Structure formats: C-alpha cells, structure tokens
Amino acid sequence: DDGNGGGGGGGDDGSDGDEEEEDKEGRLSRDEANKACESAGIKLPRDMAEIAAAEGIRSEAMNAFVELMTKKAWLGWLFAAIPAIRDRALADPTFLFKLGVEVFGDVALSLASEMSGRNEHFWDEAEYFFSDVAATTCLNGAVLTMLSPVVTLGKSPGGRKALKYNKKIGGKLNHFLRLLFYKYPRNLPKHVFQKGNYSTTYRAWCFVSQGFRIGLMSSTVGLAGQGTANFICSMRRRYLPGGYSERYASTVHPEAPPLLEPAIEWGGFMGSSGNARQQLIAGVERVIQDANVKMPTLNLLATLVLRVGNNLWGGEQFARRMREMEDAVWEDYSSKVAKAAKLNKEAKKKKKKKK
C-alpha cells in the first residue's frame, strides 16, 4: 500500500465509500482520539487530528503517544514544531535518547575540540566556532531522523494522504517538513539493517539513496554555516578590527576562508563515510537490542559509546581533511598573490624605463 487509497478506478461511488469505512476498522476516529487525549490531560496535535479525520488513527500509535506525552509532557513543544521527531519517537522508544546523544554529545565534543584547537585564538574565531557547532548539531539530528524508522499513524505512512486530502500544506513549515520526510519511498527501509521483509536490492538502494540525501543535506548545511560565518567575519573585520588580538591580527589571512570547497568536501565526506558509519551503528544497535532484551540500560550504554565514539572519530577525520584542503587553498592563494605582486613590480620597472 503506497497510501494512494488502493487501486485505480473512479473513486466516488458508494462501494468505495463502504470500503473506506471498512478499512477504518481498528483505527480511532477524530472524536475518539480527542477523547483519549482529553482523558489523559493532553491536547491532540492538529496534524494527528487531520489524519484521524481522513483515515483514522491506529490505536497502538495513539496509546503510545498518550503514554509518551503523559510521562514527558515537556516534549509537546518539540513534537509540535517537528512532527518527524514525534513519529520516530513513537516507532522507537530509544530514539529520543539517540537524538540527545547525537546533539548534546556532539556539542560537548565540538566545544572541547574547538577550545583546544583554536586555543588562545578561540574568541578571535568565535563566529566559526559557533557556526561549526550549529551546523554539525543540526546535521547530526537530521541524519539520525532520516535513518530512523517511522510510525504509521493512520493508513498511509505519516498521514501524508490525510494532509494532502485536507489541503493543509499552505506554506506551513511543519506540514512541509512532514511531506519532505515522507517523500522517501515506503517500500525502502530507512537504513540497511532495518527489520522487515526487504530484498537485498531494496537495502542496497536504501544505502545509495540515503547517502545521496545525506551528502546533499550536508553540503547545504555546510554552505549556509560557512557563508554565515564568513559574512560575520567580514563585518567584524570592517567595523570591529580592534576586536582581534594583536598576535592573531598579524597572522590572519586577509581573505575570508573558502566557501564552496568546505561545503562540497563535507557533503562528500558525510554522504560516503558518514552514511556508512551511521548505517553500521544502526545495525549494531539492532543486534544488541535483540540479544539483550532484559537489560535495556546496557543497550543505552552501548548506544552512547557507539555514537560518541563515531562522532569523535568522524570529527577528527574530517578536521584533518579540512586542514589539508585549507592549506592547499591558502597555498594556491599565496602563490597567486605573489605572482600578482611580481607582475605589478615588473610593470612599475617598465614605466620607470620609459620615463
């Protein structure tokens, strides 16, 4: 079922209506979903209400949502802002822990790495530190979300059909994000090792397509982060030149760091190495979870070690590649500057001879 209502044909006759009503059996209507939420003292999200009205909410998904919101009501704002996170948290009880490790663990690692790497020049390059942290944090969260299984709330995955039927897109960010995430074909797994009756071909396509998506998103995020940092840097050099330490100002390159090269490099790195490592981690987590059902705390500890270790190793590898690339870029830039200076000097000599 691809969420298109099942089959071709006309679609407005009475038999189709009977089939739709029969197909809704076992799923909660909008009124029933509202009552379940009201009895628990929570509010039914608007998009879930739309799904319930269009095709019904699965009772298992509704119960999981009520239980999660009852225990962690403070997540309401996050689920409202990014429904994709909610739908993955309902499919995987450990998703929120994984997300926390990816986001906050990477912030801690980035802070430690930048503080030690930039050393006394930390505040001189503060704009690049904050842009790096923001970019990697957003990207890590997005990659985990892209590779995580999704709960089916209604008949179609993510209620995409319900949103389309109710025509509620209208430029709203949360609906756009939902459509964007669920544009991914349903017959492909989210990651190579996801449970399910997927063929080897489908799993291979999953690896390739997710690598492309991760690479594209990484390049976009890298371009935005580097561009923002470069803009702040240029403004800072123009209007606050005294904000740099004297030692740093004497050694800093006169031009802002390259823009396109790091974005392309990051996209290639994440689309290949990053994708492979994240897929492998998901597979190892699945094996550990299946083998250790009685002690879930150990599963969380394994997740912590795997993901922090991956971020640490991956960060070091990319930082090394970036240093090599920046050295090559600056060497090329310096040679061009030296060549231009030489040509300028020769031109001045020719003018003197003519006089």
Image (cartoon, rainbow, N blue to C red):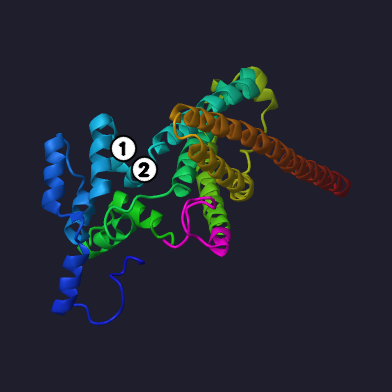
- Of the numbered discs in the image, which one, if any, rests on residue 185? none
User: Looking at the image, which is closer to me, 329 or 273?
Assistant: 273
Quarter of the view holding residue 42: top left
User: Looking at the image, which is closer to me, 354 or 329?
Assistant: 329
- Residue 118: x and y in percent read 63, 23
Mark 2 surroundings within 10 Å by alpha-carbon count, few (fewer than 14), some (14 through 19), many (20 or more): many
Horizontal arrangement in the rendering, residue 145 relative to residue 71 (left or right): right
- Residue 109: x and y in percent read 56, 26
What is the distance, in whole Å, between disc 2 and disc 1 at their CAs? Answer: 8 Å
Span highlighted in magenta in the image: 186-205
Circle 2: residue type: Ile
Q: Residues at badges 2 and 1 in contact (C-beta under 8 Å)? A: yes
Hey, which residue is sitting farthest right in the picture? 353
Name the element at disc 1.
helix
Q: Magenta region, mostly helix, strand or loop? A: loop
Name the element at disc 2.
helix
Residue 143 visible in the displayed image: yes
- Residue 151: x and y in percent read 34, 50
Q: Residue at x 20, y 55 (%)?
A: 27
Horizontal arrangement in the rendering, residue 159 relative to residue 331 (left or right): left
Residue 239 visible in the displayed image: no
Q: Residue at x 40, y 54 (%)?
A: 181
In the rendered image, which residue does mark 2 sit on? 85
Q: In the picture, which quadrant includes the N terminus? A: bottom left
Vertical placement of residue 10 versus 114, above or below: below
In the rendered image, which residue does mark 1 sit on? 78
Q: Is residue 294 magenta?
A: no
